[in-house]
Amino acid sequence: MNIKRSEHIATAVNPEGYPISELPEIAMVGRSNVGKSSLINFLTQRKSLARVGNTPGKTRVINFFSVEDKLMLVDLPGYGYAKVSEGEKRRWQKIIETYLNSRSRLCGIIMLVDIRHKPTQHDIIMYRWIVSMGKPHIVVATKADKISRAHYDRHIKEIRNTLNMAPGVPVVPVSVTKKTGFMEVWSEIEKTVPGIDITGKKED
Ligand SMILES: Nc1nc2c(ncn2[C@@H]2O[C@H](COP(=O)(O)OP(=O)(O)O)[C@@H](O)[C@H]2O)c(=O)[nH]1
Ligand SMILES: [Mg+2]
């Protein structure tokens, strides 16, 4: 399948800067450098719609990207980057929390964790908070090319246990370099947003 149309719509730090739009939104949440921007490029089949590999911790803004004029993917600032001041950390936290708490068309959240590593304390706190919001969510395990397929199960189990995930919530391994997990993530997004059909595979 091909995504025909995707576009950078807005960059914002606070609600005044959020775009005026009716599109349902899916937000990417995760540590700095985990692969949020890469996942957006992967899902939109664009090389550099979202900027990848900035100096970690430099993305202090929210970026909104429309897909097929049907959906907005939202790239939130990464948390957990050590080399910034406490004040700076609080500012980021506020940007993320304000968005997640106030955005009424937020339909679902994709929480990203690196498939190689046990989720950190920051991840655990963030995940608990996502669960408590009661919005649909999935976990994407990024950089799946960095481990062998034979080890997927073990790593996914560790992620599930550490985050204390309910059995019904999927963990989807994704590698943007090997281009695996594309349909799986889109299909989860389609389940999350009522009536949306990006892949053309949904039956109605
Ligand atoms: N090998 C590999 N590298 C990845 C993958 N996804 C992201 N990266 C790399 O991880 C780094 C951080 O990615 P980025 O998307 O900027 O992370 P962000 O800070 O969460 O937006 C970049 O160097 C990416 O090229 C993946 O699936 N496989
Ligand atoms: Mg990024």
Image: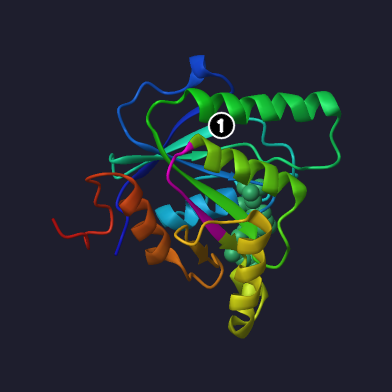
Question: Residue at image x 57%, y 56%?
Answer: 165
The reply, left or right, for residue 68 in relation to residue 104 is left
Residue 32 visible somewhere in the drawing: no
In the picture of the structure, the residue carrying the numbered disc 1 is 62
Image height of 150 relative to 179, above or below: below
Location of the N terminus by quadrant is bottom left
Q: Is residue 170 above or below residue 32?
A: below
Out of 134 and 70, give the one closest to the viewer.
134
Task: Specify the amino acid type for callout 1.
Answer: Ile
How packed mark 1 is, by other alpha carbons closer than 10 Å (few <14, some 14-19, many 20 or more), is many
Asked where in the image residue 158 lies, by quadrant, the reply is bottom right
Which residue is pictured at 68% across the width and 30% down the height?
Answer: 93
Q: How many marks?
A: 1
Query: Splitting the image into four quadrants, where does ligand 1 fall?
Result: bottom right
* Residue 36: % across, % down: 58, 49
Q: Residue at x 21, y 59 (%)?
A: 202
